[in-house]
Image: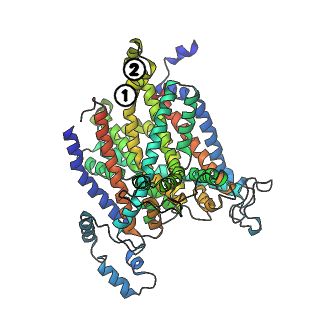
């Protein structure tokens, strides 16, 4: 086990090196001249040349890549062309909002998805099964951005229950705190007004983001539960007179959860992609919104920084999941 | 009685197709897709009005007899635009898959067949691509290539191929030392012949099943890029970009974003229903789950 984790960790730098190289190649294929973008629309050719020299854009590409790697190792992602601030400072500001949104969406996925999947498998062909099938099919087929718009139309416009977009009401001061997660910071400060407001603004985007991952988790829980319930040891559990909850939860669910955990890990990538669309629709000030603005402005240090951050998060989640399910399932030995 | 006697002689594919024919979801999916492909083929001939014709006096009309699905903010007929969009979406779905499969399958064949450093290079490259969240990579590539429908398709395909490479390589690794391949090699078949005539046909079913599950996602991903502004550009009647333009009208003119949204939903649903059914039919392990 320890050897497996060590091997995975040893391969991590190589993977990150590959990721940084791919990112460097992609962002240097951008047709626009970054020097012109940095110098601004009114700059003359000399100024553009000056910018090129100062930023090292006149050097050969391998030299540029080496310098890029060197700054990366020092935690320096460069300056954003659009906001004129260090990219890591921008990300530090926007990232907590994204974390708050995705973590809540992930929790909602598990809390709703796993019980629904179990119920669908236990009462196969019943009402829960029907609900599960509808949820999983529509979740995979509904464009997340359209679903977000429908949620806005129904819950903000028609029912007027929840706000249209943003992260907290304009007349409520955002809670200052160590985490940058409004819900937690508000609780730590005992500021219930801020907590309530932040929660209100969080519901619709989180629910929208939950849709697609919910579909996968319901489907996976259902099918892996069905598979487990047909095993001999489940028959044995019934035969020795165990009560239903014990058979389903202790003997069934524990074994059915392993593939679900894997799917959740893999799908965290989908969640990180979906967050772009959800943040755009709900004006949620996270890295998704930040990088869409960066993309439209061809702000390549910011694009590169965001992509790198999300990729590192994705790699870490998957590493964590692999380790977690080795711990969950004593049969897995690496 | 007869069927059980005949059943003994039926091939695996025959069984799978029979199973498929007995799955209602497969029929629903096939019906939606038949309609979609029919509309994509003849849609523009059916459109009541020119999908690009601007009519400033008919802005944002609700659904009525003249405009069955209403009009958009430039007075264009929504039904005509949706029908024109069907062709675009179908093209996107199949083209993205064709590019991703072409690249992914060839590299998978190569990596699986010539192990050693070729395999290492190809597989480590797929590792790097797979390290990115898929839509993030597609957005990144689309941003680099510049906004446009074809660039968006290339971007989605480039974020997709490694899945096919992994799938095909795994299969080739398990097939290449089997007797039929060794036999062909022993009578002098070269690598090209072994790959194309003996190995590829044996992995084709797996590829087709995976592809049938992926077309829907490809349409969704391309529509997502258009929604962000990196895909099809106005006035192209692509469904995702129609929703993006309709976004600000949602509150007062519900029909404008709703109909393109429903169109994407139905198209993707059709592919998913059929794709799921095909996968279940060809993977007997999954059949009992339904």
Pick out the residue farthest to the left: A3
Q: Residues within 10 Å of mark 1 (few under 14, many from 20)?
A: some
Relative image position of residue B94 (x, y in whole percent): 52, 49
Q: Which image quadrant for residue A6?
A: top left
At x 40%, y 40%, the residue is A263
Q: Which image quadrant: the N terminus of chain A?
A: top left
Tell me: residue B189, above or below residue B258.
Answer: above
Residue A255 tag number: 1
- Percent across and percent down for residue A211 are 52, 45
The Cα–Cα distance between marks 2 and 1, rounded to whole angstroms, is 11 Å
Q: Is residue B214 visible?
A: no
| Residue A251 sits above or below residue B83 on the image | above
Query: Under tag 1, what secondary structure?
Result: helix
Disc 2 with disc 1 on a shared chain: yes
Q: How many marks?
A: 2
**Figure colour scheme:** rainbow
Q: Tell me residue A208's x, y (percent).
A: 53, 49
Q: Is residue B170 left or right of residue B140?
A: left
Choose between B271 and A154: the one closer to the eye: A154
| Residue A231 marker | 2
Mark nearer the N terminus (2 vs 1): 2
Residue at the (49%, 38%) spot, across then down:
A112
Label placed on residue A173: none
Asked if marks 2 and 1 touch (Cβ < 8 Å), the reply is yes
Q: Secondary structure at mark 2?
A: loop
Mark 2, other Cα within 10 Å: few <14 / some 14–19 / many ≥20: few
In this rendering, position of residue A279 left or right of residue A322: right
């Amino acid at each position: 086990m320890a050897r497996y984790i060590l091997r995975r960790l040893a391969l991590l730098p190589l993977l990150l090196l590959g990721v940084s190289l791919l990112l460097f190649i992609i962002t240097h294929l951008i047709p626009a001249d970054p020097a012109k973008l940095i110098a601004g629309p009114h700059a003359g050719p000399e100024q553009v040349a000056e910018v090129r020299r100062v930023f090292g854009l006149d050097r050969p590409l391998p030299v540029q890549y080496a310098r890029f790697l060197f700054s990366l190792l020092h935690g320096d992602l460069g300056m954003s062309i659009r906001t004129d601030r260090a990219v890591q400072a921008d990300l530090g500001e926007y990232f907590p909002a994204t974390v708050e949104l995705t973590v809540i969406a992930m929790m909602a996925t598990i809390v709703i998805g796993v019980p629904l999947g179990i119920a669908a498998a236990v009462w196969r062909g019943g009402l829960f099964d029907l609900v599960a099938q509808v949820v999983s099919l529509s979740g995979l087929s509904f464009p997340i951005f359209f679903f977000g718009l429908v949620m806005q139309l129904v819950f903000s416009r028609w029912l007027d229950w929840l706000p249209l977009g943003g992260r907290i009401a304009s007349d409520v001061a955002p809670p200052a705190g160590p985490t940058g997660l409004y819900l937690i910071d508000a609780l730590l400060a005992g500021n219930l007004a801020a907590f309530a407001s932040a929660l209100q603004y969080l519901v619709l985007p989180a629910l929208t983001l939950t849709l697609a991952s919910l579909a996968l988790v319901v489907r996976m829980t259902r099918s892996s539960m069905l598979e487990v319930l047909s095993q001999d040891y489940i028959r044995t559990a019934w035969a020795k007179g165990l009560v239903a909850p014990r058979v389903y939860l202790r003997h069934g669910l524990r074994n059915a959860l392993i593939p679900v955990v894997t799917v959740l890990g893999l799908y965290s990538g989908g969640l990180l992609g979906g967050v772009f669309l959800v943040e755009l629709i709900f004006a949620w000030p996270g890295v998704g919104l930040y990088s869409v603005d960066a993309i439209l402005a061809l702000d390549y240090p910011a694009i590169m920084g965001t992509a790198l951050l999300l990729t590192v998060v994705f790699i870490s989640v998957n590493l964590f999941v692999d380790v977690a399910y080795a711990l969950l399932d004593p049969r897995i030995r690496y | 009685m007869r069927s059980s006697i005949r059943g003994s002689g039926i091939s695996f594919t025959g069984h799978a197709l029979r199973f498929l024919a007995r799955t209602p979801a497969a029929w629903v999916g096939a019906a939606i897709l038949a309609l979609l492909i029919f509309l994509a083929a003849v849609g523009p001939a059916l459109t009541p009005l020119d999908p690009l014709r601007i009519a400033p006096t008919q802005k944002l009309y609700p659904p009525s007899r003249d405009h069955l699905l209403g009009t958009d903010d430039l007075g264009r007929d929504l039904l005509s635009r949706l029908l024109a969009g069907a062709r675009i979406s179908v093209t996107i779905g199949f083209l993205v898959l064709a590019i991703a499969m072409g690249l992914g399958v060839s590299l998978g064949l190569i990596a699986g067949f010539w192990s050693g450093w070729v395999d290492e290079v190809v597989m480590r490259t797929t590792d790097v691509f797979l390290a990115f969240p898929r839509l993030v990579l597609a957005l990144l590539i689309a941003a680099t290539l510049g906004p446009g429908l074809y660039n968006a398709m290339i971007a989605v395909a480039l974020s997709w191929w490694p899945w096919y490479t992994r799938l095909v390589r795994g299969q080739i690794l398990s097939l290449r030392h089997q007797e039929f391949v060794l036999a062909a090699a022993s009578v002098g078949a070269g690598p090209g012949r072994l790959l194309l005539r003996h190995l590829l046909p044996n992995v084709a079913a797996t590829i087709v099943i995976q592809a049938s599950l992926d077309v829907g996602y490809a349409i969704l991903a391309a529509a997502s890029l258009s929604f962000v502004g990196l895909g099809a550009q106005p006035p192209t009647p692509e469904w995702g970009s129609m929703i993006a333009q309709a976004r600000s009208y949602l509150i007062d003119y519900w029909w404008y974003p709703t109909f393109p949204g429903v169109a994407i939903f139905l198209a993707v649903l059709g592919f998913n229903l059929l794709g799921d059914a095909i996968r279940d039919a060809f993977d007997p392990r999954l059949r009992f789950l339904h």
